Image (cartoon, rainbow, N blue to C red):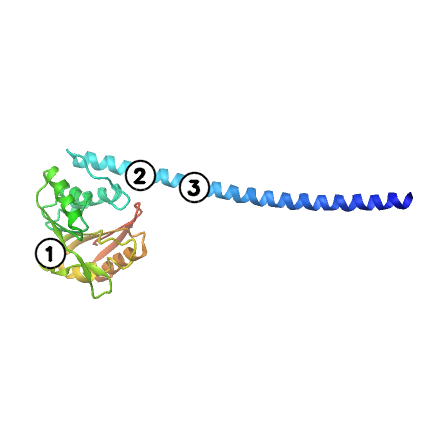
Amino acid sequence: MKTLSFVLLIVIAVSLLYCIRLLRGLHQKVSARSERTTREIAASTKEIKAQVWQSYRQSEAMQQLMTLLKFTSPIPPTRSWAASPDLLLTLAQLVRTHNPKLVVELGSGVSTLVVAKAGAKKIISIDHSAEFAEKTREMLKEHKVRGVEVRVAKLKAHKSGSDWYDTAMLKDLKRIDLLIVDGPPGSKNPQARMPACAELIAKLSPNAVIVVDDVNREGERQLAENFAKALPSHVLTIYPHEKGTAVISPK
């Protein structure tokens, strides 16, 4: 009996040790999962806060823009692939501050309307899409805007290695006072807009202002820096806009 009792005690002790180990392992797994869940919740909360703040900033910029330019007809949607309100407001302010005689824009759309409504005397907007160019023309007509020429320059192989606008459509450009680079589409090709500097630098007026959108992306940031290096009398300013905006302006 004593032997049997001793064996039972050993079995019970081993079983208890096994259960304790299982509980410890389960506790560690639950703790690790809880910590991971806590981190994930914190990351999601931070992202949601950033999105809410960004939406507020864009709404604030749009309200100022609407008040400043007094649109009399609906305007196309902004953000996403279109220009964001913070960029549009900056363009309006630049036009009013510098009073450019000639604005050249790579990529037409709502920005074309904003620049025209802000008081630019002459605008030449380049678009690679005939369909989208026509939509821009219709929008400008609806808003009774004049002094804007929307040109279609299809994308062709460029010596840089990327497809870029047909340079034949840009030959007559000269003394550009405000250059806006927001095309061609660059989300899939970081080098898509790089030819803008080489092709247009000699066509700028001495006091030209250059605006590059999407400088949160590496390719556009490099393009802005290239413009700044090519214009030693200018200064590069990066604005913390939704997509990042670079303004290269005279010192």
Please state which of residues 132 and 219 is positioned toward the viewer in this rendering: 132
Helix, strand or loop at label 1? It is: loop
Of mark 2 and mark 3, the one earlier in the sequence is 3
CA distance separating discs 3 and 1: 46 Å
Q: Residue at x 15, y 34 (%)?
A: 73
Amino acid at dot 3: Lys
Q: Residue at x 91, y 44 (%)?
A: 2
Q: Which residue does the numbered mark 1 point to in the structure image? A: 175
Q: Which residue does the numbered mark 3 point to in the structure image? A: 46
The outermost residue toward the right is 1
Helix, strand or loop at label 2? It is: helix
Q: Which residue does the numbered mark 2 point to in the structure image? A: 57
Question: Eyeballing the image, is 195 above or below 136?
Answer: below
Q: Is residue 231 visible?
A: no
Helix, strand or loop at label 3? It is: helix
Please state which of residues 6 and 104 is positioned toward the viewer in this rendering: 6
CA distance separating discs 1 and 2: 34 Å
Q: Is residue 140 visible?
A: yes
Of mark 1 and mark 2, the one earlier in the sequence is 2
Disc nearest the viewer among 3 and 1: 3
Q: Residue at x 79, y 43 (%)?
A: 12
